[in-house]
Amino acid sequence: MRRIASWLLGVLLLPVWADISLGGSPRAGMGGAGVAVIRRPAAQIAQNPAAIVFVQGVRLGAGDLELARQGASLRSLIDDLEIRQGSITDIDTAAELMRKYAREDNRLLITGDLGIIVSGVGVTVGGIVDARLLPNAPLQNWARNDGNINNIPANARGDIIAVGIVSLPDITTGVRIPAEQGDLAVGVRLRNLRFYYTHYFANQAQLQAGQAATRAPEMQGRDYLERSATSADLGFLWRPTGDKRYTLALVVENFVEPNIRFQATDRNGQTFDFKPLKRTYNAGIAIELETGSLIAVDFIDVGNNAGKGEIRLGYEQRLGRGFALAGGYASKTGWTAGLRIGGFNIAYADKLPIIVSRTLNF
């Protein structure tokens, strides 16, 4: 067992009221926009696999660490939650944890990866952990207005739901198709996925005792569920010939949808069809100016098939070799700001937009 804090040392020195991206996608500070960007293409492959066509030589990448939180502070969440195979907390202490975080919905999202690109082929390993602490309305009202353990309502309930997906590995490659009017780059990412899921809940008696919770019905008596699956993403980038400085893009996330699907229960105990990875269509345009400015506009989940439809706007300004400032806006998560120093990217936001290819329907 290892606490999240053991591998995130140094993060606690940064502001805990914000979501943080450390060394992650350079587009995190641009409101998440960037499916059409090919500036620093090795860093863009997570958003659009077609970007690998523009990577020259051998490239190593490590980190892409992004932390997002909702509700409680980042410091509190990474101190109390644990990363273990298939779970983020011990069932024997889950009720105590839910009572501590009973005022509001809480969420901790962590993504990271590392990999290598050689001769137009990229091999990457990485993962996503999405953990949520979900008190129902009666429990939230109690936590905000009372707080006396003896007065926890009879219909109070708190749920802990966590999903983890590990890529072992992602393999990305592409081809460039030159034409008279422009170049078309096509990329594909094959993903070998290992999926983990856990769901505990605590009722009034368990919340008062502050100890063990109950496994949700879909767990069938186990601490976590585990699945293996394969998926594929497609990416397209088109750049016109001549002096035109714009690029158009289309990314089909989960073009081949992974076969991960089962009947789960929500925080109210209602059954629903749980499918964390669905096909989405993402389009974008990027414009580079002679002044060193970069403007990007993305249309995420066109058609809203996965319920993630939004518009993202981003701007980056180079300030010299290896330095750039960025800002952006995502219609679902708000404003972002970022800084690039050499190959290291830092981004802050009250709520960072999740990078395309790292989103879960959950």
Image (cartoon, grey):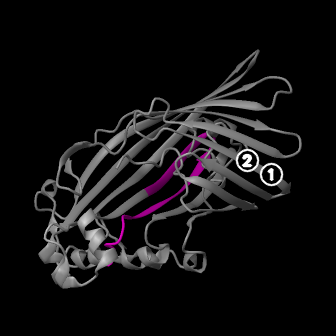
**Picture quadrant where residue 61 is located:** bottom right
Q: What's under tag 1, amino acid-wise?
A: Gln
Q: Quickly name the residue at label 2.
A: 315
Give coordinates of residue 174: x percent, y percent: 58, 33
| Residue type at tag 2 | Tyr
**Looking at the image, residue 174 lies above or below residue 329:** above
**Residue with the mark numbered 1:** 317
The secondary structure type at the circle numbered 1 is strand
For this rendering, which residue is in front, 82 or 172? 82
Dominant SS of magenta comes to: strand
Q: Nearer the viewer, residue 265 or 252?
A: 265
Residue 280 drawn at (x, y percent)? 45, 34
From what the image shows, is residue 332 above or below residue 98? above
**Magenta residue span:** 100-127
Above or below for 202 versus 258 = below
x then y, percent, for residue 93: 23, 79
Position of 158 compared to 50: left or right?
left
* Corner quadrant of residue 238: top right
